[in-house]
Image: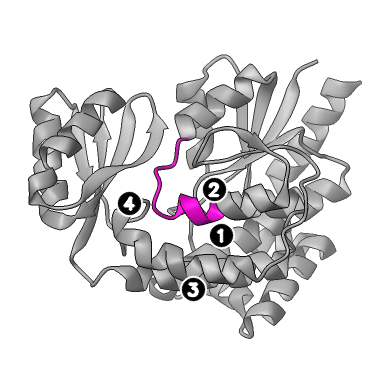
Amino acid sequence: MGKLAFIFPGQGSQYAGMGKEAHDSFPSARAAFEEADRALGFRLSDLCFSGPEEDLKLTQNTQPAILTTSIAILRVLEEKDLHPDYVAGHSLGEYSALVCAGALTLPEAVVAVQKRGRYMQEAVPANQGAMAAILGLDARLVAEACDQASDAGVVSPANFNSPQQTVIAGEEPAVVRASERAKEKGAKRVIPLAVSAPFHCALMAPARDRLAADLKAIQFRDLKMPLVTNVDAQAIRLGDEARDSLTRQVCAPVRWVESVRYLVACGVDRFVEVGPGRVLTGLVKKIAPQVQASNVDDVRGIEALASGLSNATM
């Protein structure tokens, strides 16, 4: 029998109303939102359910909102005795994965990611950083394009999302030049991204250093199941390894393609995206079309997953 991985979304999955249906339908989901509200000292739940979206899209709010919604849904799945063999998360989603694995509590994680979001926002002055998605070009050629644009400033691959999608990040003039080089090398499309900061590049060093001090103060527990990290695309089980991964992750690219392939090599044949949106589900299907991939972000998805996995194990 194959193995199951829970994967957790990061940036770009926020929307007003996220998690409200689960909150209203399941006491365990409601309790998760209440835990986050207490830990943060304000009603994050109201922001998730009602917006306004301009506030929800602020990085320091987006990150705890996505994490809390993911964990609220996870709590319901755990109640239904659904547990993964492996976990992974994309960028911010790695915190959700660590809560699932027992290395962090929800209050510890939600406070840490709120600070992480603020540090990232403050690391680069407004309008000086940029990100762009390069579509239809091999990752090696995208990296070459970044190298060739480095005389215009800092720019590097930030997310290796799928074999045909690599996101780059850095200083705005360098990102523009790297985008031009990528087009010359045969990229099908280059899409500038509406982001608040250039994530996962060297410009995030100030955020990494500030976050490292906060993470050092948290006691990370050893993991109940393996987590495949963004930064190394390898499985870890120790709490100290998790802390180190989260620290290095801030400036390093998200190696999602390698992470999914590593999980498949470990025998995972079913991926379930736990949390708002279905971005990762789409990426998994492009990386490993032979596996099953689905998302769970509402009551219908929870019930369908519970029924499907129950039938699969009978």
Is any part of residue 56 visible from this angle? no
Residue 66 is tagged as 1
Q: Residue at x 14, y 40 (%)?
A: 178
Q: How many other residues sit within 10 Å of disc 1, few (<14), some (14-19) or many (≥20)?
A: many
Residue 51 is tagged as 3
What's the CA distance linking mark 3 and mark 4?
Answer: 29 Å
Answer yes or no: do the residues labelled 1 and 3 have beta carbons within 8 Å?
A: no
Residue 276 in the image: x percent, y percent? 57, 52
Residue type, numbered disc 1: Ile
Label 1 vs label 3, nearer the camera? 1
Residue type, numbered disc 4: Cys
Residue 9 is tagged as 2
> Which is nearer the eye, 289 or 95?
95
Label 4: which secondary element: loop
With 119 as the anchor, is 309 left or right in this view? right
Q: Residue at x 61, y 40 (%)?
A: 88
Label 3: which secondary element: loop
What's the CA distance linking mark 4 and mark 1?
Answer: 22 Å
- Colour convention: one colour
The residue carrying mark 4 is 201
**Mark 1 or mark 4, which is nearer the start of the sequence?**
1
What's the CA distance linking mark 1 and mark 3?
Answer: 13 Å
> Which is nearer the eye, 121 or 303?
121
Picture layout, residue 108 above or below residue 138: below
**Mark 2 or mark 1, which is nearer the start of the sequence?**
2
Magenta stretch containing residue 248, yes or no? yes
Residue type, numbered disc 2: Pro
**Mark 3 or mark 1, which is nearer the start of the sequence?**
3
Residue type, numbered disc 3: Gly
Label 4 vs label 1, nearer the camera? 4
Label 3 vs label 2, nearer the camera? 2
